Amino acid sequence: MAPSPLFLLLLLVLPASVVSQGCGMLNNCNGHGTCTVSTGKCSCYEGWGADTDKAYYKAPDCSKRTCPSGRAWGDVPTTTSNAHALAECSNMGLCDRTSGACNCFDGFAGDACQRMKCPNDCSGHGQCISVKRMASLGNALPLGNTTTYTGFETSHTWDEDMVYGCVCDSSWTVGIGDGQTQEPEWFGADCSLRRCPSGDDPRTAADETDCHGKAAKNSAVKGQNGNKCHVDCSNRGTCDYRTGKCSCFNGYYGQACNEQSALAHD
């Protein structure tokens, strides 16, 4: 016996009516959201796919986590002066949908991969600080007049708290002022290299350690009166930057090779 038209109609209508009365088909939002009964859709909590979450994927049944967001390191601009919108893991990591944690790409860190790592954590001989803070320091390289790099997070200074680098340690004061030296004791991108003792070349009339009027490396700013240049081994030896110790040429001695003996020759 063929089914009646009424029975067939019920088969067509029943699934829609059941769904419209709850979120059973969505496992009742898995305990991570609320159900809108009239539509049979879940409104997920934050971190599980809420409207405010920035995520590439949101599970309709609230069963998958979303990850923290930050300004995108790279994205498609929306206008000529508007880019770096909020993005999951700052577009520099992959989201673990089970834990809700970002797995950052190499060189990036932070809960949203929103911060650059410093190489080798500055090797224990420097501070890892933001470019915003660097701008206000007198000893950050390249040396220059202190300034500010902040205030325009949605445009020009979008990376002020994202780009980080090493400011290396030094047993002497670094800067362009009186009594300061233009180069730090520890140097290199990861502060793993160490300069040797400095001194004036005993074979010249000029004072090579006088940096008054001399431009700092990679900078247009010049040393003030009393400013010092760093001269490894007084130009009378070679510096082992791994140890910070001089190997003096024949006829020269001392920690900075600035002492001359009778064996010295041109």
Image (tube, rainbow, N blue to C red):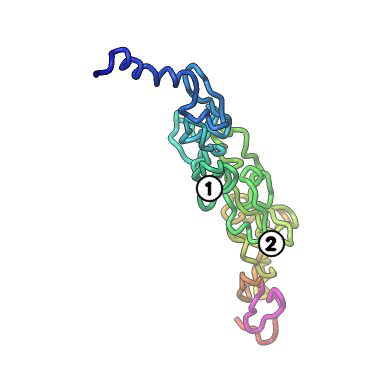
* Camera-nearest residue between 18 and 53: 18
Numbered circles on residues, count? 2
**Where does the N terminus fall, quadrant-wise?**
top left
Residue indicated by mark 1: 103
Asked if the magenta segment contains residue 251, the reply would be yes
Ranked by sequence position, the earlier of labels 2 and 1 is 1
Residue 261 at x, y percent in the picture: 70, 84
Residue 4 at x, y percent in the picture: 28, 14
Q: Residue at x 45, y 18 (%)?
A: 20
**Where does the C terminus fall, quadrant-wise?**
bottom right
Q: Is residue 251 left or right of residue 37?
A: right
Which type of secondary structure does the marked residue at label 1 adopt? strand
Residue indicated by mark 2: 210
Q: Name above or below for residue 203 compared with residue 186.
A: below
Question: Given the image, on which type of amino acid does mark 2 rest?
Answer: Asp
- Which residue is situated farthest in the top direction here? 6
* Camera-nearest residue between 183 and 96: 96
Using the image, tell me which numbered label, if any, was put on residue 265: none
Q: Which residues are magenta?
A: 245-259
Residue 131 at x, y percent in the picture: 61, 45
